[in-house]
Amino acid sequence: MNDVVKRTGTFESFDGTPIYYEVRGTGRPVFLCYGIACLMNHWTHQVKHFSTRYQTILLDYRGHHRSPVPENREHINLDALCLDVKGLADHLEIRNASFWGHSLGVQVLLRLYDMHPELIANMVFINGFASNPIKGMFGTDAIASLFEVIKEGYKFLPDTFSYLWRWGVENPLSIPLSALAGGFNLNLTSLKDIEVYARGVASMDLNVFISLFEQMMKYDATPVLDRVKAPTLIISGNKDGVTPPHHQDVMHKRIKGSQLLRVPYGSHCTQLDLPEYVNLRIERFLDELAYK
C-alpha cells in the first residue's frame, strides 16, 4: 500500500454539490460504493489488495462525511447518488468500469445500471438487496415502525432527535448489539474498524439518513435484475441479520449468469469479516473476465 499513490479531490455534481473522492493505483478502474451512513473504511482491505493492480476509486455520497449536504435537500435521493457516481466517472474521464457495492450501494448500482448500463463492465454485490430490506431486518418487522417514530419525531423536535441519534450510536452497547443482530462479526472484524464506523454514523445529519433510508425502503430494483447483462458476482454472509441471504438469493436467481458466494460466518460486513477470502474470490471473478 505504501507504494500506491493516493489522489484526492472534489468535483461539482449536477446541482453544484462538491463530491469528495479518492483514487489509488493505476490500471482498469474499480468503483467502490458503500452503504447508507457508511465510510470509505468499509473498503479498506479491498483498496489495499486491489490498488496494486487496479485503479480503485471511492467517493463520499452527498451528505456523507467530506461531501456536504446539498443546498436543495430534495436532492437527497437515490437518483442523486447515482448522478454523483456518474459525475465522478465523467470527471475522471472513465467510460466503463467495474462497480462494487455494499448494502445500499447495491441498490445504487442497480439504479445506475438502469440509467447508464454502458458505464458498467461488471459488478460485485456484497450483502446487498434489490428491494425493501426492512421487513425481517434483525429478525423482526418492528424496524419500519421504529423508523416512522424517528421520522415523525424529527419533524417536530429535530434537535432532540439528532441528540438521541448520536447518543444511541455512540452508546457503548450499540456495537455488541449490532454484532448480536448480524451487523458485524466481533470475532473476525477489527474493533477499530467498527468504532470508526460508529463515529461516522453519529456525525451524520439525521435528516440525510432519514431521507435515504426512506428511499431505500421505497425503491424496488427487482425488475432491473432481469435486464442485467453485465457479469455479476454476488457475495452473501451466512450470519447476516441485516440483509439475510434470501435477498442475495433473489438477485442470483434473477440475474442471468450471475455467480453466488455464500461466506460462512460472514455478517452484514463480510468484506471486513473475512477480507482475504472475499478478495481472492473477487480476484478470480475479474481474472475470469480478463478484466485487466
Image (cartoon, rainbow, N blue to C red):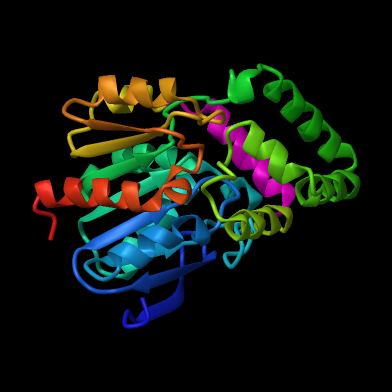
Residue extending furthest toward the front: 187
In terms of depth relative to the viewer, which is nearer, 220 or 25? 25
| Quarter of the figure with residue 22 | bottom left
Residue 182 in the image: x percent, y percent?
58, 33
Residue at image coords 19%, 64%:
28
Choose between 247 and 84: the one closer to the eye: 247
Magenta stretch secondary structure, dominant = helix
On screen, residue 257 versus residue 70, left or right, reads left
181, above or below 154, in the image: above
Residue at 30% x, 68% y: name it. Answer: 51
**On the rendered image, what quadrant is the N terminus found in?**
bottom left
Image quarter in which the C terminus is found = bottom left
Looking at the image, is 63 positioned above or below residue 126? below
Indicate whether 188 appears above or below 91.
above
Q: Position of residue 173 (x, y in %)?
A: 78, 43
Relative to 220, is 216 on the left or the right?
right
Q: Is residue 155 magenta?
A: no
Q: Residue at x 37, y 67 (%)?
A: 48
Q: Position of residue 103 (x, y in %)?
A: 48, 39
Q: Quadrant of residue 112?
A: top left
Q: Is residue 211 magenta?
A: yes
Given residues 62 and 183, the one toward you in this image is 183
Q: Which residues are magenta?
A: 204-220
Give me the residue at 72% from left, 58% from top: 203
Residue 53, by quadrant, is bottom left
Q: Is residue 170 above or below residue 221?
A: below
Q: How many marks?
A: 0
Q: Position of residue 197 (x, y in %)?
A: 62, 55
Determine whether, in the image, residue 282 is placed left or right of residue 183: left
- In this rendering, would 218 be left or right of 171? left
